[in-house]
Image (spheres, helix red, strand yellow):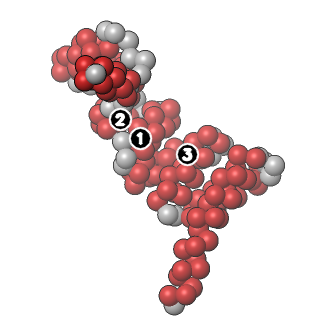
Amino acid sequence: MRLLLSLVILSLAAAAQTPGLPPDYAAKLAGLEQARRQSPRDPRVLEALAGSYAMGGRHHQAAVVLRELLPLEPSEETRLRLARNLAWAGDSGAAIETYEQYLQARPEDRAATLELIRLKRWRGDYSAAERLCNRLLARHPDDAAVLALKAEVLHWAGPRKRTARHAA
């Protein structure tokens, strides 16, 4: 019985690891890290390494590499990848700043705007999240996803506004 329980626990632990990594992921990652040591300013190497780190769920390391890549090959796509990896790494302050920089150049990017709204909502910046929702709704007033997100923002903002009024 203990053996069966141990096997179940081991299989659950294995299933909890990042799914879908190729069997040669570790070897390819090691090769990219070696290539980075040999050519630390090669944009192709940095691009591939950041992608591999992100694929493996190592978002902090991906963000470090993307920060190195951005000055070498400035692009809004790289900036957006950096923002996403910062968010996934838990650095929401830097992620918000990077999303805002990206959206200055690409204000029409609905998906990135939604990601920023969610980050601001999570951080408790409900007013900014609501303003971003309103900006999207000005272009597409019947956007169901944005309307639902705005409802969430207003729902979570409500108790804090009432609490602040009662405390004053």
- Give the residue displayed 49% in from the left and 47% down from the top: 99
Secondary structure found at label 1: helix
| Position of 68 relative to 35 (above/below) | below
Where residue 88 is drawn, which disc sits there?
A: 1
Q: Earlier in the sequence, mark 2 or mark 3?
A: 2
Q: Callout 2: 10 Å neighbours few (<14), some, many (20+)?
A: many
Residue 14 sits in quarter: top left
Which residue in the protein does label 2 denote?
A: 59
Q: Callout 1: 10 Å neighbours few (<14), some, many (20+)?
A: some
Residue 61 sits in quarter: top left
**Residue 100 vs residue 27, the one in the foreground:** 27
Residue 153 in picture, x, y percent from top left: 61, 60
Q: Callout 3: 10 Å neighbours few (<14), some, many (20+)?
A: some
Residue 81 sits in quarter: top left
Mark-to-mark CA distance, 2 and 3: 16 Å
Secondary structure found at label 2: helix
Marks 1 and 2 close (CB-CB < 8 Å): yes
- Give the residue displayed 30% in from the left and 24% down from the top: 5
